[in-house]
Amino acid sequence: MNILETKGLYHNFKGLEVLFDVNLQVREGERLALIGPNGAGKTTLFNVITGNYHASHGQVFFKGKEVTKLTPHQLTRIGMGRSFQITSTFARLTAFQNIRQAVLSKNKIRFQMLKKLDKMQKITKETDEILKRINLDEQRNIPAGMLSYGKHRALEISMALATNPDLIMLDEPTAGMSRDETHTAVELIRKLTEGKTVVIIEHDMDVVFSLADRITVLHYGQILASGPPAEIRENQAVKDAYLGELEY
Amino acid sequence: MRTKLFNWILWGLVIILLAILPKLTNYYYLNLFLAFVIYSLYAVTLNLLLGYMGVLSFGHAMFFGTGAYTVALVLKHIEAIPLLPTILAGGLAAGLLAVILSPLLVRVSGTAFAMLTLAFSQLIFVAALKYREVTGGEDGIGITNIPPLKFFGIVSVDMTDKINFYYFAVIFVALCLLLLWYYTKTPFGSLIVGIRDNALRMDYLGFNLSHTRAINLIVSGTFAGLAGAVHALLMKLVSTVGVLDIGTCFKPLMMAYIGGVGSFFGPILGSGILHLLEDTVIKFTDRIGLVNGAIFVLVVLFAPQGLIGLFNTLKAKWFPKEKVS
Amino acid sequence: MSPTTVLYVAQALHGLAYGMLLFLIASGLTLIFGMMGILNIAHASFAMLAAYFCFSVMKLTGNFWAALVIAPVIAGFIGVLTERFLLRPVHKHGHLAELLITVGIMTLILEIVKLFWGTESLVVKIPENLNGLIRFAGLTYPVYRVFIIGLSVVVLGFMALILFKTRLGKIVQAAVSDAEMVSSLGINTPLVFMLVFGIGIWLAGVAGAVAGPLLTVFPGMADQLGMDAFVVVVVGGFGSLLGAFVVALFLGELNAYGIQFIPRLAPVLMFAFMALVLAFKPMGLFGERE
């Protein structure tokens, strides 16, 4: 069954067509990599699916329901999570406070004005558990903006995961990372997304081929090909458009 | 544990000082102190928006003034209304104004928010100035009959007595401040800070930004209205210049900024400094505005986190804590 | 012309004169906003400052024309200094700090004016040849107001020349539509900012100086002019000269006819209109940028 599906999705930005009849299918439980050259519209597609932008034409279906017009917070509440290409955390808040915001959301605590947050043991415990799982327990009280790049990215990804989404959309989780950091991040993603549906935008082909069950190639706002990694690797059109460039 | 004990002792001393203050000083200083207390609350409500949510209300006097005018009008038109309902009416009216404006105000931030609040406050200012049959125009409305404070119809405390009014006002404002302090410590308080730092992320975490912003706006407006209500009773006069004009919009802003917008207590410190300064400067020159303005400019230039921020920076510099990597 | 027509025409001219003054102030305000992203709350305070300078220079030299030239230049120079020593240092703290510092500057100018010139209204005497009345087809109209309209047109024509014919003008135009582009082109932005700020203040200064004889010079002048200019920029659209022009004239006329026919409603309407525009088109009627 498809957990996410787009039908004839168009998006134009200042008169420029960025997405062009995109029909994307994501099956429940799979790990789908979305690849394509820069400017292919991958992040735009993420923004349209997650409700940050609205499609100029076409529909988005999530868990069988149409969600084209929903906003990010509505989509998050029905189980969609998203991380950003450019790290987007609360820079002045500590790592602990960052994760805690997400834990509050997961526990549907949105208008609680009667209890002191520090006294809510359950929230604190849950937050600390997450910090431990992502190896950030030592950096618990450091402002997010002062974390090392790798740790900051890990925080970014885990905030998207802390709301416990069914579909996780990761926008270049390893962008700007060193080889070692990338390796750690991939292991972390694998560990944290066990048994979940993941859509991941990625440039690093090693990451793509090690993580993804299936690959969809986006090119000039259109889907060029879709299939298992081995098939995509051999696909001539993809090679011409994209993979060829990578081998410099 | 030691800091906790220290805090208890500190607060104990503050309470004792507040209790014996009327014995220590004359009516002039008592009034000055009450003005400081009331403006502290007003500046804190502004900081709920500025420091906590990251939007600048350029027209906060509309809430303060609405509270003040409501009290004056209620006392003028409704006979024998007790004290607390009068003041609460002021808060409620200001809160209602915030409710009405919130659908428009939550859509904008940055410069647009500042401009929109300024526009609405000017609108209300001009309306209050022009519709004099209701508001008394420039002359305003005098308050001659401060009602007594009644508990369950048994105890009745005379509020025309200055000392009684002092105790009442201090306790009332202190309770408001306590409530607001608690409010900033709740989960909801942390959501507001989240919106300040990264609204998009908050949206993606599943929080409804508009509702969260609107509620904080209403809380801020309501309490600003309560401050205005008590202020009206202290001054016994409500006129446009004094509760609604642009000066009344900027005053809490200066206080919050001078004290420090990054801390709950910053605006209170700022209010204290400006009131103390006013009393000191006036002995030498009546150019109090010049001194205030200069201090404000200096703070914005050199200590953007206010005096509390400056203090923390210096403390960290001179007494560095053990570095954690 | 019938007496009623005369009244209408006279009011229309009043409105035009005030509208042009507003546009002089608002054009600088909107350029500064478009270029630097700063809404200069103190803008009209500089206009007021120029009015006071005009009064003093006039008193010293007895020459109105000299005062009219010198006062705005001094104001503009102070504007340049303000940009250099007050605005530029807080630029790194973001727009909120910039907005706040202009609030501080507004307070300081008001207090300085009170300190040096007192709180009384001061009267600037205009030369004999501007003091007369024009008679035309049954209409009698003060020469000075016609002079204001004429001068504004000349100044604005001069501005248009700078904006459309010089390198600085091209940079300003580019910056208003795309601020990032200018810095990426390697243009000395701090210098351009300083110049634009100075010219903006100079424009306000011209308006303040010529407005002196019309409104009398008093410490509340900045509030009156400032609020109106502010409405012009907000409603017309941040950074839009065309918008500022249209709204300034409209506001001038609203002011003139409003005082005549709906004295109480006119100012309320003005702010209500501004609030509505802001609420539904936060960048103003002619504003393009988000």
Image: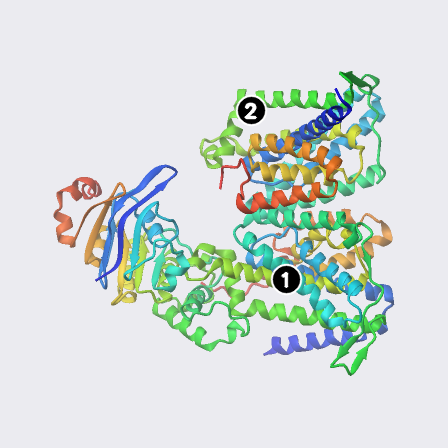
Image: B243 above or below A142: above
Kindly identify the residue that appears in the image at 49 percent across and 42 percent down: C290
Image: B284 above or below B325: above
Image: C52 above or below B137: above
Quick one: quadrant of the N terminus of chain C?
Answer: top right
Q: Which mark is residue B95?
A: 1
Q: Position of residue C34 (x, y in %)?
A: 55, 36
What residue type is disc 2 on?
Leu
Q: Position of residue A228 (x, y in %)?
A: 15, 54
Chain letter of the residue beneath label 1 in the structure image: B
Q: Report if residue B246 is visible in the image.
A: no
Chain letter of the residue beneath label 2 in the structure image: C
Residue marked by disc 2: C163
Q: Report if residue A160 is visible in the image.
A: yes
* Front residue of this view, candidates C124 and A157: C124
Q: Secondary structure at mark 2?
A: helix
Is B288 on the left-hand or right-hand side of A140?
Answer: right
What residue type is disc 1 on?
Gly
Kindly identify the residue that appears in the image at 35 percent across and 55 percent down: A50
Image: B200 above or below C287: below
